[in-house]
Amino acid sequence: MPLELRFAAPDVRFCAEIALAAGYSAYSAGAIGNVLCFSKKMTPEEGLIINQYADRLASYYDEEGGIPIYREFTAYLTGTLVPPCVCNSIMILEALLAAAQGVRYVCPGYLQGGDLIQDTAAVRVLEKLTREYLARFDYADVEVSTVFHQWLSAFPPDTARAFAVICWGAATAALSGANMVIAKSPEEFHGVPTKEMNAAGARASKQIVEMLRTQRLPPTQELDAEMEIIEIETRAILDKVIELGEGDLAVGVTRGIKAGVIDIPWAPSMYNAGRVLPVRDRDGRIRFLSPGHLPIPQDVLDFHKERIAARGRAEGREPGYEMLVDDVRAVPEGRLLGVPHP
C-alpha cells in the first residue's frame, strides 16, 4: 500500500529520514514553499540546502535500493488568494530542484482558488509546463502527476456548509484532471479536526470523484483564454528565475526571492517581499491588485487591472485593500466574491 507522510516544517530532514526508514513511499515538502510559509527567519539558502539533502535521500532509496520515492511539493503555501501563476511557478521550480538531486517521481500541486474555470486552467497549465521545463533541463524521464488541494482558507462555521465547500473542491479536482486530491474536514472552521470528521471529508470527496471519474471540463473559449493568461505569467516568472541563476537554478531561486520575482502573498518569512496583493474580479477569479516585482508582461497586467476595475464599477466602489479583505472573508459568509461591509 502506498503511504505518504505529510508535514509542514521548514526543516524537513528528520521527517524525511523517519518516513523513508519506516517504509513510506512518499512525503511532501518544498525548498521554497515550506521555507517561506513556515519559517520567519530561515534563509532561502539554508532552506535549499536542507531540501537538497532530503531530495537526495529520496533518490538514494530509488537508485541504491530500487525503491521509487514519490515527492510531492507543498502547494498549499499560505492558502489564501494565491494567484495561480505564483503557485504554478513555485511548484515547477520545486520539481526542477528535486530532479537535480535525482528524484524521478514528482507531484507539483495546486491550491483551490474557488473558480472552476480558473482552477481547471491552472491545473492543466501546471502539468503542461512542469513536463516542458523538466525536458528543457534534460529531466524528460521524470514522471509527473498533479495534486489538487481543496479549499485552504477559512471555512463556513457549520458542518453542512463546510461539506459543500469540500465537495466543490473534489468536483473541481476531478473536472480539472488532477491525479490526486487532498481532502479537508468539515470541522476545519473550529480547530483541529477529529479522525472521524477527517474520514467523513475523505468519503464525501471520494463520492464526488467517483461520480465524475470519466468527466472533464471541456475546452471552451473562456477556459482557453484563462490557460493562456496563466501560462504567460508562469513562464515569465520561471524564465526570470532561470535568467537570474546564470546556469544554476538554486542560485536563481535565492536571487529571485531577494528580488521579489518569487513572492507569496501573506508569507511570514522576513525574506519574502510581500508586495503581491491579490483580489478577485467580477467572475471570482484571482487577479493582481498589485503584482509587486513579479515580471508579468504589461499587457497582462492591464488585463488584470481592467477586470478588477469592472468589478469596482459593478459594486460602485474603488478597488483596494478593503475589497481584498472582503474576499478573504467571503467563503465563511456564504459567498466566493466578497461584498462591501459597513
Image: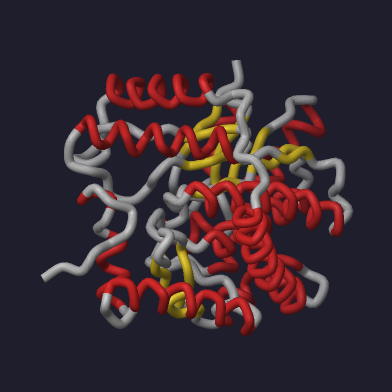
Describe residue 56's horizontal placement relative to residue 168 as left or right. right
Q: Is residue 187 above or below residue 276?
A: above
Q: Residue furthest right?
A: 138
Identify the residue at image location x=80%, y=42%: 142
Q: Residue furthest top?
A: 1
Q: How is the image coloured?
A: secondary structure
Identify the residue at image location x=28%, y=62%: 338
Q: Is residue 161 visible?
A: yes
Quadrant that contains the N terminus = top right
Q: Position of residue 246 (x, y in %)?
A: 80, 77
Identify the residue at image location x=62%, y=75%: 256
Quadrant that contains the C terminus = bottom left
Q: Position of residue 293 (x, y in %)?
A: 55, 82
Quarter of the rendering containing residue 47: bottom right
Q: Is residue 138 above or below residue 218?
A: below
Identify the residue at image location x=49%, y=81%: 292
Q: Position of residue 304 (x, y in %)?
A: 51, 75
Q: Front-most of 177 and 8? A: 177
